[in-house]
Image (cartoon, helix red, strand yellow):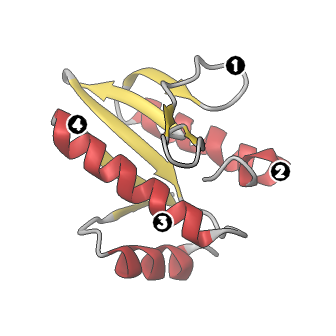
Amino acid sequence: MIQLDKQTENNNTFLTESIEYLENKGFENIKADIEGYETPISYTRQKTGNTLTPDIVAEKRGIKYFFEVSLKSSKPRLLKSKWLLLDTLTKMKDYRFRIITTKGHLRFTKEMIAETNLNKEYIRI
């Protein structure tokens, strides 16, 4: 989710549900870009100065995972670039990158994955 989309109440509710899902799956040291959790490390683009923060960062069995919540966005181009940056970063550091979505946003998520040529499966909650 981009920063603009994180400001709505409905999106924050889904982010909280995603965190609960990950806790039930055994993830630890969860950091999230939401109130009540420690904020993950942000990355800043040198050209534009935009700051990108993963939605959720968690660990399981010593492996760090970056989770990105996929909801319909008003700026899909910015969301695509965020996903590509996080995917590249996780490959460089031997982390894992996953996308979480829900009913009503599946088609949008599938199209975004296809357009960015990411070879990713999504987690449906």
Residue 125 horizontal/vertical position (percent): 51, 57
User: Up-down: is 67 above or below 107?
Assistant: above
Residue 6 visible here: yes
Say which element carries label 2: loop
Query: Where residue 36 is drawn, which disc sits there?
Result: 1
Residue drawn at the location 29% of the way across and 42% of the way down: 89
Q: CA distance from mark 1 to mark 3?
A: 27 Å
Q: Which residue is mark 2?
A: 8
**Do tag 3 and tag 2 residues touch (Cβ < 8 Å)?**
no
Q: Which residue is mark 3?
A: 80
Residue 124 visible here: no
**Do tag 2 and tag 1 residues touch (Cβ < 8 Å)?**
no
Chain-order first, disc 1 or disc 3: 1
Q: CA distance from mark 3 to mark 2?
A: 20 Å
Q: Which residue is mark 4?
A: 95
Q: CA distance from mark 2 to mark 1?
A: 16 Å
Residue drawn at the location 68% of the way across and 31% of the way down: 34
Give the residue type at disc 2.
Answer: Thr
User: Up-down: is 41 above or below 122?
Assistant: above
Say which element carries label 3: helix
Q: Residues within 10 Å of mark 4 (few under 14, many from 20)?
A: some
Residue 18 horizontal/vertical position (percent): 55, 44
Chain-order first, disc 2 or disc 1: 2
